[in-house]
Amino acid sequence: MNQLLKDALQHIEEADAVVIGASNGLSIAAGIHLFADDNAFSDNFGDLALQQGFRCIIHGCFHAFPAEAEKWAFYSRMFAYFLHDRMPDPVMADLLTLVKNKHHFVVTSNIDAHFAAAGFDPERVFEIEGNCRNLQCANACHDQLYPGDELLATMAREQANGKVPAALIPVCPACGGKMQVHIETGPRFLKGAQWQARQTAYRDFVTQAQDGKILFMELGVGARNQLIKAPFMQQVYQQANARYITFNRGRELFIPDAIAHKSLGIEGDIGHNLKQLVSLM
Ligand SMILES: [Zn+2]
């Protein structure tokens, strides 16, 4: 394992550009499990879950709440749990340490906004499915994202009995309708100018880096993931100078034979392995 980590560090150091791809497994390594009915879920969402009948955070995101007061109680609580009540995360800090002096870009389906919170440049992060801190019109009547930090923190603080006060519930400044958090839970998720600008920045980064040594570094992305993993593997296959490192646990660690000679697979706890890598720097 130690040699594998040394090889991985050498790949990072030799790369002209690093593309980081991250999904649910990285959030889990940082202590957030969207799919688990665990102690953290009970501690942070237990009363809302009991009242509304959902059993994990992701179910809450797709839950049909009876009214806006209950909906915002959940989403503001989620914001506070992901960001506001959380200490700086050591897993994300280690990841940043590994790449901060490299030309890098992040693509992620995680909605917890932890890359920006950890100090990654938001201009170099493409959050494909949005994040927990921006708001949009729930009717998608206009293409604008609104920073929600202040309002969400207030709603998290001032909610009672599973409801936020009516005066705090946001309404769309254009149509007067409902608002929602900008995460992809349905067809009205805005993929407008701001979303597209980030997608373009990501594509441009990969295009401009492909003539040099480009490293695709993937963290906690499931073996059958089509959103991040499949495009990464295609790029590695097509580009002569590309390399690929994937971090995951057990059977989720997958490298196809066609790119095996350019690839390293690092199995086990992602947080532990990132810390080991930093200690080797
Ligand atoms: Zn609207």
Image (cartoon, rainbow, N blue to C red):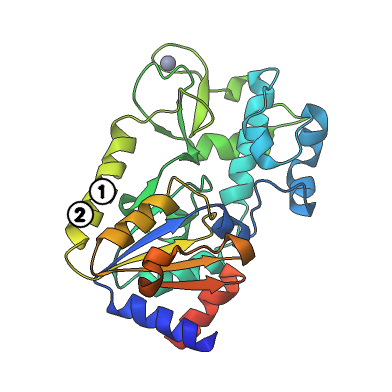
Of the numbered discs in the image, which one, if any, rests on residue 281? Answer: none
Q: Which residue is mark 1?
A: 203
* Vertical order, 280 against 179 (above or below): below
Q: Position of residue 205 (x, y in %)?
A: 24, 55
> Judging from the image, what secondary structure is the residue with disc 1 in?
helix
Q: Quadrant of ligand 1?
A: top left
Q: Which residue is mark 2?
A: 207
Crowd around label 1: few <14 · some 14–19 · many ≥20 (10 Å): few
As shown in the figure, which amino acid type bears the numbered disc 2? Thr
In-front residue for pair 31/24? 24
* Vertical order, 129 against 165 (above or below): below
As shown in the figure, which amino acid type bears the numbered disc 1? Arg
* Residue occupying image coordinates x 47% and y 23%: 187
Whether tag 1 and tag 2 are in contact, CB under 8 A, the answer is yes
Q: Position of residue 168 (x, y in %)?
A: 59, 25
The answer to which image quadrant residue 120 occupies is bottom left
